[in-house]
Image: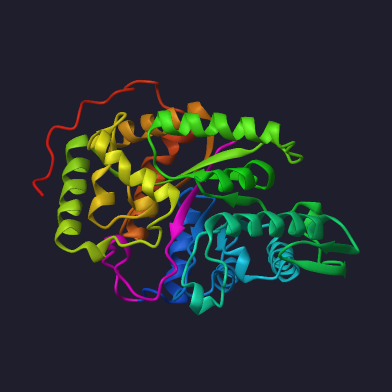
């Protein structure tokens, strides 16, 4: 199965996200287009465009970027509970038509500024029930005409989406979530299940469970694929990479606002935070300290090491069935080029299986 490599576009007005020191142009369309263009030039298929209250609208940003790039695929993060299904189906089909199929969607169910959005559903399991119904209806709207549907959360009558997704190919749906309710949605409705940076044994168990669930629940779509969303701190040598990682964690410990993220309280985030109890470095080079000093989501754990070491670590995830990789580090604009030029070629042409266990991390930053 082919591999897909994407970067991350923070899509924030205020600078400083995860320690990025960019000031000039940050949050502007020109900066976003520059970052997307750099991703395009340096080997990335596209980038995940973040969403959240207080950020620019991800679909508007994706449309503007797509108009000024040629192959870049925006992976647009969107919360389905804040759209009507027919509106969402039409918007994604339109963007896909205008760009020749260059749009994927990262479906986000987690809570975010509920009152500000006017969202009255706070219970996590109910939110996943709503997402399940939403996606089932959206898939019908993408592929059928004259759709009538009455559900618990949504209703349409004689609904036909125009335009249709080009070539009859609906946008690829990425999905995250680690709770039992989330996994049921993923097993039946997602195209790609995204994981944050857990150790290999945790990812292996979750993949097995999702495959079992998909069969048990009668999945009607093609087999579920799997992706990894993680920060990579990679340098020419292991020593340089660990030095950079430790210095950054020390800054986060002194100023936690550097890495604050909006995933606190989710099952997936709790899993990441619990990893530090198993050790500061897991597997070959999975660094767990960042999550306790301001990191969140994909910033909670980092793969740290030389290009060879991090490539070997990512290959081990690929051995488990991961084929979609969403990687990042800051400053985003510098790292998209450096990591694209130096790490991605090792993953496209898989490196030697050695070293499987690079030399152990030698010291921990004094926090």
Q: Which residue is drawn at 31% across and 39% down?
A: 275
Position of 353 compared to 99: left or right? left
* Residue 195 can be seen in this image: yes
Q: At x 87% / y 64%, what residue is drawn?
A: 148
Q: Residue at x 21, y 35 (%)?
A: 238
5 relative to 20, above or below: above
Asked if residue 77 lies left or right of residue 338, the reply is: right
Q: Quadrant of residue 151?
A: bottom right
Residue in front for this viewpoint, 306 or 112: 112
From the viewer's side, name the closer residue of 177 and 51: 177
Q: Position of residue 331 (x, y in %)?
A: 31, 59
Question: Vertical placement of 355 versus 260: above or below?
Answer: above
Is residue 7 covered in magenta?
Answer: yes
**Seen in the image, is 68 located left or right of residue 277?**
right
**Quarter of the N terminus within the rendering:** top right
Q: State the extent of the magenta-drawn residues as a range.
A: 1-24
């Amino acid at each position: 199965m082919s591999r897909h490599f994407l970067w991350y576009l923070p899509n924030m007005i205020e600078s400083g996200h995860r320690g990025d020191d960019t000031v000039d142009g940050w949050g502007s369309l020109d900066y976003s287009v520059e970052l997307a263009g750099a991703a395009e030039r340096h080997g990335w298929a596209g980038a995940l465009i973040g969403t959240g209250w207080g950020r620019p609208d991800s679909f508007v940003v994706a449309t503007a970027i797509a108009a000024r790039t040629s192959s870049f695929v925006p992976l647009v993060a969107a919360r389905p509970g804040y759209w009507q299904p027919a509106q969402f189906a039409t918007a994604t089909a339109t963007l896909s038509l205008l760009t020749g199929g260059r749009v994927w969607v990262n479906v986000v169910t987690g809570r975010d500024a509920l009152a500000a959005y006017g969202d009255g559903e706070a219970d996590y399991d109910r939110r996943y029930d709503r997402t399940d119904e939403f996606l089932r209806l959206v898939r019908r709207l993408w592929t059928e005409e004259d759709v009538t549907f009455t559900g618990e959360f949504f209703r349409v009558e004689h609904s036909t989406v125009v335009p249709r997704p080009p070539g009859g190919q609906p946008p690829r749906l990425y999905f995250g979530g680690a709770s039992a309710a989330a996994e049921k949605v993923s097993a039946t409705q997602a195209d790609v299940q995204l994981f944050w940076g857990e150790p290999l044994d945790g990812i292996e168990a979750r993949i097995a469970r999702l495959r079992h669930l998909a069969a048990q629940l009668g999945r009607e779509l093609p087999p579920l694929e799997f992706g990894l969303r993680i920060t990579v701190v990679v340098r020419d040598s292991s020593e340089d990479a660990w030095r950079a990682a430790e210095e950054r964690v020390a800054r986060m410990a002194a100023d936690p606002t550097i890495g604050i993220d909006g995933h606190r309280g989710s099952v997936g985030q709790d899993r990441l935070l619990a990893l530090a109890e198993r050790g500061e470095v897991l597997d070959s080079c999975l660094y767990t300290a960042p999550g306790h000093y301001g990191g969140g989501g994909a910033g909670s754990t980092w793969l740290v090491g030389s290009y060879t070491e991090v490539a070997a670590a990512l290959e081990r995830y690929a051995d488990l069935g991961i084929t979609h990789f969403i990687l990042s580090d800051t400053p985003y604009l510098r790292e998209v080029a450096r990591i694209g030029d130096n790490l991605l070629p090792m993953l496209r042409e898989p490196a030697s299986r050695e070293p499987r266990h690079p030399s152990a991390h030698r010291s921990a930053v004094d926090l």
